[in-house]
Image: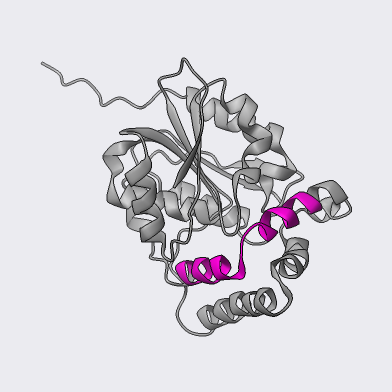
Amino acid sequence: MVSSHFSGGFAQQLLLVPGLMCDFAVWQPMLATLQQHAVCRIVDHGDADSLEQMAATLLRDAPERFALAGHSMGGRVAMEVLRRAPHRVSRLALMDTGYRARPIGAAGQAEEHKRYALLELAQSQGVRAMAAQWVEGMVAPARLPDAQLIGQIVDMFARKSAAVFAVQVRALLQREDATPVLRTVRVPALVLCGREDAWSPVSQHQEIADLLPARPAVCVVEGAGHMVTMEQPEAVAGALVAWLQQEPAHAPAHST
């Protein structure tokens, strides 16, 4: 399902894809700025239980051609959209996200254990209790005393149920490697992350940028962790506007 926030007069369509247990609040602080440059639509994953289903639902409800910005799990959904329908995506922004499949062996088991421990907490004590614990690693340490910011993030998570958390965790654990997708991207691309993102570090975004044929510079947002769009919305909005205004690459003319 896609919820629409229209701003008339623009040919460019922009789909904004939230991450795990996130919703419109991830994009809300930047929406007024972005609406000056594109028709913005915020995606809702509903109860989809795989990245593939999330991508299929997005494509079903999307315009014929659109710019695509994904944050966290939303970035992985964006890469699944590209895997399925690259001709429909005019621009790609990947923010505080990852591209690899779940690793095999001990590292993969550790990730699974960590995710299911959070799910168990959400099921036993409620999503709000889980979010209050989880948020401590999701923002820059200096922002933890910011009661308004922390409250907005916890409230956002609490709008989702433990059942939604369960299906989204399963979707992430079953993710495919997106390396082949990244190597085929030929549209203007933005790779962005918070300097203090402990979940998806700068080094991981450099790997993403290196896989893209255009090898864009990684946009690193200072004073932000994983929830960069809520921590530093002005900086992120500025980067997204520059990306929306970036001229597409053109194939060189054939000599005669």
Colouring mode (rainbow / by chain / secondary structure / one colour): one colour
Residue drawn where x is 56% and y is 42% of the image: 218
Q: Who is closer to the viewer here, 29 or 237? A: 29
Tell me if residue 183 can be seen: no
Q: Who is closer to the viewer here, 158 or 235? A: 158
Residue drawn where x is 41% and y is 56% of the image: 54
The quarter of the rendered structure image containing the C terminus is top left
Q: Which residues are magenta?
A: 151-172
Confirm whether the magenta stretch covers residue 137: no
Q: Is residue 69 above or below residue 54?
A: above
Where is residue 176? Give x, y as percent. Answer: 38, 65
Q: Is residue 220 left or right of residue 88?
A: right
Where is residue 174? Give x, y as percent. Answer: 42, 71
Residue 203, located in which quarter of the rendered image?
bottom right
Residue drawn where x is 59% and y is 82% of the image: 113
Where is residue 185? Give x, y as percent. Answer: 35, 43
Where is residue 18? Give x, y as percent. Answer: 55, 49
